[in-house]
Image (cartoon, coloured by chain):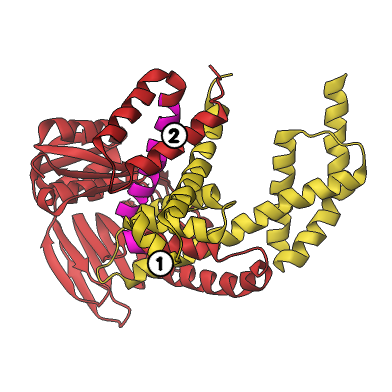
Amino acid sequence: MTELTRERSIADVFADHHSWLKRWLMERTGCNEQAADLAQDTFVKVLCKQPTFEQAAAERKYLKVVADRLCIDMWRRRALEQAWLESIQQQPEAVDISPETQTMIIESFLDLDRRLRALPDHIANAFIAHKFEGLGYRAIAEQQNVTERTVKNWMAKAMLACIEVEAELDQVLAPA
Amino acid sequence: MKKDIPYPVLQQAAEWYVTLADEAVSEQDTRQWQEWLAADSHHRKAWHYVEVTNARFHGLGQIAGAGSSRQILEAGRSIGAQRRRLLSWSIAGIGTALLGRYLWQQPSLWSPAALVADFSTRSGTPLQHQLSDGSQLWINAESAVNLAYGIRQRQIHLLCGEVYVASSQKKDPRPLQVVSQGIRFRALGTRFSVTSQPSGLQLNVFDGRVQVTLSNGQTRIVNTRRGLVIQPSGDMTEQPVDINRELWRDGLLVAENMPLQQLLEQLQPHVRGHLGVSDAAASIKVVGTFPLQQPEQVIRMLSLSLPIRLKTTLPWWRTFELETE
């Protein structure tokens, strides 16, 4: 019985909100095709989570949040992709990496980006510099004009954000 | 088995990371950390996540370079909540333009043309196809081909990758041609292959002859057992054909004193992810017959039989290097 109600509710959500969501996404992205794809992806996400709602208004709010996240993901992916392409064009020697592998590289950057997304810029950027360029706590403290203790707090926050995601992923992938 | 790691344990792991990554880490710190690790399996699991995180950063830093990696991630972060809408327009434009240019330079399966090609193969799956005139066409892994068989001509457009053509013995007034990067390869009763790569084109004639016509109209005949390398600049070099180069059709890669780098280039289309080789190991000579359908087995065979080891920077980014490196 519950199963049936749930299935109906998803179908209802789709019927009631699909065109509205597509219009909203169209305004946001300025591209019809992209809006259609993102709307599709949004419903797939919702289908996977199967939330239950009592009011249509709550449904739209939820759909907006999911769709918004997908939009940001898309834009961030583009920004990362562009930065990656610029970086390989700057290299004097031709880089012989298959496009498939390039996609994997961009996905991996996006993975890191997602882990650090909730953090304020100053923390995330300090952590990025520390991880990639081996910048020490004191150097960061001097650059940012804060104490070393503060920098350590930042690093702990950033690492915590990363391992929280790893732990979550592990939960999802682990057999129930 | 699902088991949640308590949040405070994750916090402790993050704190330990900060302590150990400090230049001023003391021996006492290290000892206390080891005690903490030994005390509880949750601690070890949480620390494992720290190590996974470190590997992610380290691996990408190695692949893309430390400075570039930082710039790339910061570029992503610049897409902030307030200006995302405005930026999305300009970035969409630049991004597409750049990607477009890049893909155009590099004939690839991901180019718009290849995505809608008549035939396109992914990694590890060559394809055989009989054409309407009885000719046989083999399409190597990671390749894309369009067919244009008309009233006056029979054309095989190679967008990227490699094709092998065994032309039909039947008389046909229409010339049979492979066309790639603006260059035409006309069969004169023959078996031949054409490879299209960012570094240029390569023709191998296994039987009969092939007439090559450059985009400026210049022509040239290549005879049996001869090969031709054509650089993007139009420079051409003739060389003898490696007869073993035919065998990918049967799923075999035969190496007779083949430099490791060359072997890996032929294996790459069949492998998921990047498979590189260090400069020091690139020229090691390899002898053997390898099954292309089982690339992972080939990788294992190479590791076992040569003085090299496989360095895995990230699961999909692997590099062979000398054991002594």
Which residue is pictured at 64% across the width and 58% down the height?
A72
Which residue is pictured at 53% across the width and 69% down the height?
B96
Residue B48 in magenta stretch: yes
In the rendered image, residue A159, in percent from the top left (x then y), is placed at: 46, 44
In the rendered image, residue B46, in percent from the top left (x then y), is placed at: 45, 30
Badge 1 marks a residue whose secondary structure is helix
Q: Nearer the viewer, residue A103 or B69?
A: B69
Question: Is label 2 or label 1 in front?
Answer: 1
Residue denoted by label 2: B13
Classify 10 Å Cα crowding around label 1: few (below 14), some (14-19), many (20 and above): few
In the rendered image, residue A53, in percent from the top left (x then y), is placed at: 87, 36
> In the shown orientation, is residue B223 left or right of residue B191?
left
Residue B316 in magenta stretch: no
Q: Is residue B132 visible?
A: no
In the rendered image, residue B176, in percent from the top left (x then y), is placed at: 36, 62
Q: Which amino acid does the dot numbered 1 rest on?
A: Gln
Which residue is pictured at 25% across the width and 80% down the height?
B218
Q: Nearer the viewer, residue B44 or B145?
A: B44
Q: Quick one: which residue is furthest to the bottom in this view?
A: B216
> In the shown orientation, is residue B69 left or right of residue B275?
right
Residue denoted by label 1: A143
2 and 1 marks on the same chain: no
Which of the chains bears the disc numbered 1?
A: A
Q: Is residue A34 above or below residue A170?
A: below
> In the shown orientation, is residue B79 left or right of residue B106?
right
The chain letter corresponding to red is B
> In the shown orientation, is residue B289 left or right of residue A33?
left
Q: Nearer the viewer, residue B167 or B119?
A: B119
* Drawing shade for chain A: yellow
Magenta stretch?
B44-67
